[in-house]
Image: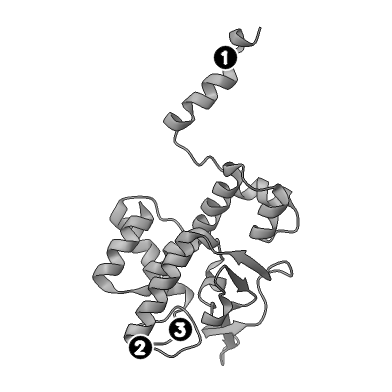
Amino acid sequence: MLIEEAERHYKKTHNVACLAICLNFSLALRVGELVALRTNDFTDSSVKIDRQEVKTYYVDENNICRRNGYEISSHTKTKMGKRELYLSADAKRYLAMILEHNQNSGFKSEYLLLDDNGERIHEFAINNVLRELNRKIGTAQKSNHKIRKTCISFLISSGQLTNEEIRVFARHEDFATTEKYYEFPTNSMDKRADAYEKALSYTKKV
């Protein structure tokens, strides 16, 4: 629902943050990593993740620490954060839409996700659009981190990848972290009914 609403909202507003949200359902990036993407991070089949946006602060005359902006850090959240991710068909489609948007707008920035002035968007741009989209579809407010959890949960439930492959994608130190904090049911109760029925049909096992 969120992806569909994001696509509709993009067609109306041309806000590239909508496409960034769609793209991240295939990449599971932290929001700081997402807004730090550059066009040259991408190849035909993968994307390199090795930087993030961080908040900057200063101490005022009253010795109070205050935020005064953002900057790009040449490292990710953890030492395990640098990674190369596969680009799915969906990821390639949203990437192409973003690049087309930038080209049609005459933007020349090295960064991928740009605002109406051709400047790199910040994490609050993603968060603001997410709040608006959640409101439009009538769901509880969900952060970008929920997108990351959703993506990784689907990788686990697909049964197509090894635990090690999923750990590397999520870039955790061990799969136990991935399993504990990122594995959630990905189907509705109705869709899980057959699996429960087969698992709990003890009389058919004797």
Q: Which residue lies under the disc numbered 2?
A: 117
In percent of width and height, residue 96 lies at 42, 72
| Residue at numbered disc 3 | 120
Crowd rating for badge 2 (residues with CA inside 10 Å; few <14, some 14–19, many 20+): few
Q: Residues within 10 Å of mark 3 (few under 14, many from 20)?
A: some
Q: Percent x, y for residue 157?
A: 58, 42
Relative to 21, residue 153 above or below:
above
Q: Quadrant of the C terminus?
A: top right
Type of amino acid under label 3: Arg
Of marks 3 and 1, which one's residue comes earlier in the chain?
3
**Chain-order first, disc 2 or disc 1:** 2
Choose mark 2 or mark 1, whichever is in front: 1
The image shows residue 182 at horizontal and vertical percentages of 60, 49
Tell us which disc is closer to us: 3 or 1.
Answer: 1
Whole-number angstrom distance, CA of label 2 to CA of label 1: 61 Å
Secondary structure under tag 3 reads: loop
Furthest toward the bottom, the residue is 61
Badge 1 marks a residue whose secondary structure is: loop
Mark 2 vs mark 3, CA separation in Å: 9 Å
